[in-house]
């Protein structure tokens, strides 16, 4: 029989990798080498997409604001320029929330921005 060195620690390392790979498809969740590759790849994507997420949300907010502006005859860029002219200190996240949940408040902002133009 072959001699094993530090069996407990190496077993724990392997268990840790396979635990992280739980739910992966096929051998990626069962075989150590492919599981290690899959876990490393998943970690790289996870890291990259955490940095990507804020931009994704910003794009979503801009789409929502643009859709709401079009109801009142404004484009997104003209609406934002109008808000700059009236010195409205409100960010895109709040504007998108107003556009979805409180159309009346958004309409008043759109009217003010349109008047400033």
Image (cartoon, rainbow, N blue to C red):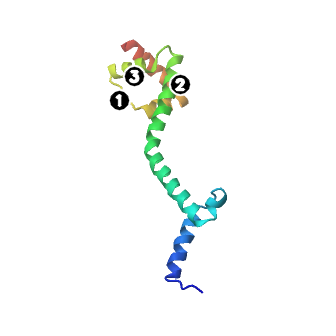
Q: Residues within 10 Å of mark 1 (few under 14, many from 20)?
A: few
Q: Position of residue 50 (x, y in %)?
A: 46, 47
Residue 112 seen anywhere in this rendered image of the structure: no
Q: Are marks 2 and 1 in contact (CB under 8 Å)?
A: no
Q: Residues within 10 Å of mark 3 (few under 14, many from 20)?
A: some
Residue 12, image x and y in percent?
53, 74
Which residue occupies 55% across, 76% down? 11
In this view of the protein, can residue 82 be seen by the observer?
A: yes
57 up-or-down from 1: above or below: above
Please, what secondary structure does the residue beneath circle 3 have?
A: helix
29 relative to 51, above or below: below
Q: Position of residue 7 (x, y in %)?
A: 53, 81
Q: Residues within 10 Å of mark 2 (few under 14, many from 20)?
A: few
Residue 103 on image: x %, y %: 53, 25
On the image, numbered disc 1 is attached to which residue? 89
Horizontally, residue 17 falls left or right of residue 78, namely right
**Mark carried by residue 76:** none
Which structural element holds mark 2? Answer: helix
Question: How many angstroms separate mark 3 from mark 1 (CA)?
Answer: 11 Å
Residue 80's disc is 3
Mark 2 or mark 1, which has the lower sequence index?
A: 1
- Whichever of callouts 3 and 2 sits on the residue coming sooner in the sequence is 3
In this figure, which residue is indicated by the disc labeled 2?
103
Residue closer to the observer: 44 or 67:
44
């Amino acid at each position: 029989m072959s001699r094993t060195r530090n069996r407990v620690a190496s077993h724990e390392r392997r268990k840790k990798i396979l635990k992280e790979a739980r739910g992966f498809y096929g051998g990626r969740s069962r075989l150590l080498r492919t599981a290690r590759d899959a876990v490393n790849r998943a970690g790289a994507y996870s890291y990259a997409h955490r940095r990507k997420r804020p931009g994704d949300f910003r794009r979503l907010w801009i789409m929502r604001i643009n859709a709401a502006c079009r109801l009142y005859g404004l484009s997104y860029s003209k609406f934002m320029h109008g808000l700059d002219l009236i010195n409205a200190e409100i960010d895109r996240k709040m504007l998108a929330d107003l556009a979805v949940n409180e159309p009346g408040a958004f309409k008043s902002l759109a009217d003010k921005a349109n008047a400033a133009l």
